Image: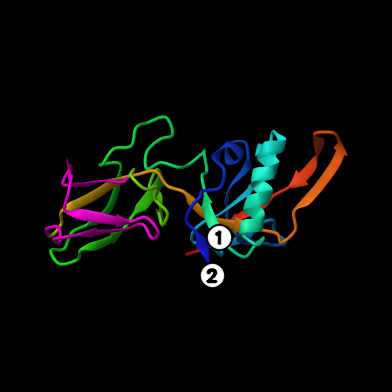
Amino acid sequence: MSFIESPTFPGKVSYGSTGGPSYRTTIVEMVSGREKRNIEWSLPRMKYNAAFGVCTLQDLETVIAFFHACYGRGHAFRYKDWSDFKSCGIEETVSATDQLIAFGDGSTTAFQLLKVYTVGTATLARDITKPVFGTVKIAIEGVEQASGWTVNTTTGIVTFSSAPANLAQIRAGYEFDVPVRFDSDEMQLSHSDWKCGTLSIPIIEVRL
């Protein structure tokens, strides 16, 4: 599967788009009214409709060009989800200590970027595979590391030149994109009047 790393889907359009996380759950309802719920996905799959972000003819032309470049569903690409694109809160500033991604063991040098969502005692760890270039910060035991590590922005893997010490907390801060593709090989456009019409641009996350 081909992936277009650059450019990212137009941020102006994604800003006005609708969508968010989607799960798959099977529910069996008993005669008594009780339920059995089976969680089929351990991680969400993001779904969006970019049509709501198209405000001008120039926006539409940009999206159509992007659709052609991707051959519809053929190629995946980066998409900025404005409701969740940082290791911290949306209105906060990224810090090297935002997310605990691992503990050192004295021998491992490569670690996956993570974002952990917590409500009470319930947590979900989401792999971050598309960090934004130039935004990643790393800390060991609370101290930001200016050097001694690199990050692969196509996979989200951080590699240290020397393995962090045993039980050392490894933390990270970053901005990130969502890996997605168009969810249709057809772009449905309807022009009802000059500069007016309807369209649908479904977009769905791809598992990497």
Q: Is residue 150 magenta?
A: yes
Residue 178 in picture, x, y percent from top left:
50, 51
The tag on residue 20 is: none
Q: CA distance from mark 2 to mark 1?
A: 8 Å
Q: Is residue 14 magenta?
A: no
Q: Is residue 55 left or right of residue 164?
A: right
Q: Nearer the viewer, residue 111 or 155?
A: 155
Query: Of all residues shown, which one is farthest toward the right?
Result: 192
Residue 174 in picture, x, y percent from top left:
35, 44
Write the residue at 38% across / 49% down: 116
Q: Where does label 2 land, which residue?
A: 1
Q: Is residue 189 left or right of residue 157?
A: right
| Label 2 with label 1: CB-CB less than 8 Å | yes
Point out the stretch of residues depicted in magenta: 136-165
Q: Is residue 106 above or below residue 51?
A: below
Tell me, what colour scheme is on the image? rainbow
Q: Where does label 1 land, which residue?
A: 76
